Image (tube, rainbow, N blue to C red):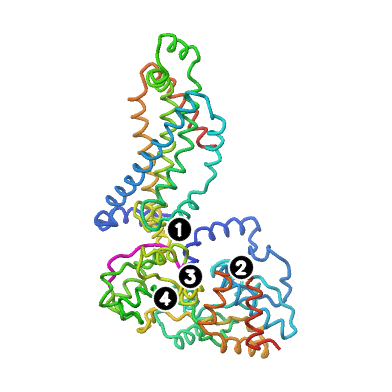
Amino acid sequence: MKFRERCLVLAVGVVSLLVVAVGCAGGQNALKESGGGSGGGFVVGSANFPEQLILGNMYADLVEDQGIKVERRLNLGTRDVVFPSLENGEITLVPEYNGALLSYLTKGKSDVTSPEETTKQLREALPEGLIALKASEAQDKDALVVTPETAEKYDLKNTSDLAPVADELVVGGPPEMSERPDGLPGLKRVYGIEFKEFKALDAGGPLTIEALANGDIDVGRLFTSQGIIDARGWIVLEDDKELSPAQNIIPIIRKQDSRRKIEEALNKLSATLTTEDLKKLNRRVEVDKDDPEDVAKDYLKQKGLLG
Amino acid sequence: MVEVLTNLVAWFADPINWQGPNGVPTRVLEHVYYSVLALVLAVAIAQPVGIFIGHTGRGGALAINLSNAARAVPTFGVILLTFLVAGIGLAPVLVALVVLAVPSMVTNTYAGFRAVDRDVRDSAEGMGMTGWQVIRRVEIPVAMPLIMAGVRISAVQIVATATFAAVVSLGGLGRYIIDGLAQRDLTQVLAGAILVAALSLLTEVGLSRLQRVVVSNGLQEKSEEASMETRLEGTTG
């Protein structure tokens, strides 16, 4: 749950920045200040990490392809910043994750994990005026990752394979993993997994990645779509008992600005995009340092999604 | 606000927070352990350098400028960088804390030595003292108020910054802050912050006591003034 993790880490900073920004702007929203163009144009927003920039650019390209003028306001921040702007109309369209957004809207009270049910409940929980289009099969969800050596040594393919050998293994992940119901307590409850030790590191960041690479940890909690996984030849253990909430990519759009042809184009992208694709695209941006705009355009062209 | 305080009191009153590997006593001990280790290392590096440049006057400008530049090094960056090289362990934290602590000690010791009255040194030499004897019996005692002020500033910085150990999966009081933020548990964050602040203050008080012991009586008043000055310097620098 990349999006939410980052919210957590940045919460304090974001809140204080917002307080200052709102204070300075005399009660006006900070985003409104950052650039004009709030005169009913079509605005694509996104959060501030590579995958969101890729998806935001894809959405913007697709809408532009319909002959509509689009303003890109990507890299905005966390959901706490982006979603309110979508609600009040400063943003028209954002790429979202069904599980994380449902959790945000229900204040963490949701406990569904299957993709279909999550999308269904998300549609019920969305505020008036916003619609969730077709969810993609591509997911950016919590994943336990191991090196090929570890996988071979312990014969690991699925998360459940960890249960008999976990007491020999050290796991590393974000600090909240030790407490969250879908973290260590969930692994114990659902899979009967109890690791030898837990190292509190970060949410799919450099600490976990390096610790896994140099053998300080045996199992790393990353995200399914991270480009680094393929780049290092690591193996994602299948969440075979569906402990982690689904995090399918899903476009959220303002109803009044939505058009049939926009929805069709976005739905076609959602139908095409897979987690493997997402991993490759993220790899280009995170590992090869390519420009998210180019990566987005290349993909759309390659899949024939631009008219 | 009242709710925050009630939660905080409840947190400190909860016996669960006072036992086991995540209990306050364990976390305080870990925090003190990292801090003492870092302080000892930093003293071992900084004092010889400070004494050498202070006594000889050679390389003073270079060392002071290097020290001042080193103050600008972001501790968080050093921790991450060392982590990427050395992996999980004490190294990232110790390196970062030593980098943080060395500059103020070097500059203070240097300043202390340079402030020793020329006449006092001359008469010491005139009495037939060797260079080493001058350092040990004249310069260090006279410079002691400033040397100790440097150690105090560094120690308080170390204690406050050892919080970062939790970022790279070690223990210490930073665990409460890092975990609390990650779990959105404001009470835990505040409790951690209060404990770190309390420990920093205790360090300051403890080292002030120590300073009174190690500074010769004739210099006590000067010592008070010097530490006041450096403390002011420390807050602006």
Give the foreground label among 1 and 2.
1
- Whether B102 is drawn above or below A188: the answer is above
Nearest to N terminus: mark 3 or mark 4: 3
Spatial separation of the CA atoms under disc 1 and disc 4: 22 Å
| Residue where numbered disc 3 is placed | A4
Q: Chain of mark 3?
A: A
Rendered residue at 45%/75% (across/down): A233
Rendered residue at 62%/86% (across/down): A266
Q: Chain of mark 4?
A: A
- The amino acid pointed to by label 3 is Arg
| Residue where numbered disc 1 is placed | B84
Spatial separation of the CA atoms under disc 1 and disc 2: 27 Å
Q: Position of residue A191 (x, y in %)?
A: 30, 79
Spatial separation of the CA atoms under disc 2 and disc 4: 24 Å
Quadrant of the image containing the C terminus of chain A: bottom right
Q: Secondary structure at mark 2?
A: loop
Rendered residue at 63%/84% (across/down): A255
| Residue where numbered disc 4 is placed | A143
Nearest to N terminus: mark 2 or mark 4: 2
| Residue where numbered disc 2 is placed | A75
- Whether B147 is drawn above or below B28: the answer is above
Q: Position of residue B34 (x, y in %)?
A: 35, 47
Q: Chain of mark 2?
A: A
Q: What's drawn in magenta, residue-wise?
A: A194-204
Spatial separation of the CA atoms under disc 1 and disc 3: 25 Å
Q: Secondary structure at mark 1?
A: helix
Task: Tell me whether marks 2 and 4 sit on the same chain.
Answer: yes
Magenta highlight on residue A196: yes
Comparing B37 with A136, the one in front is B37
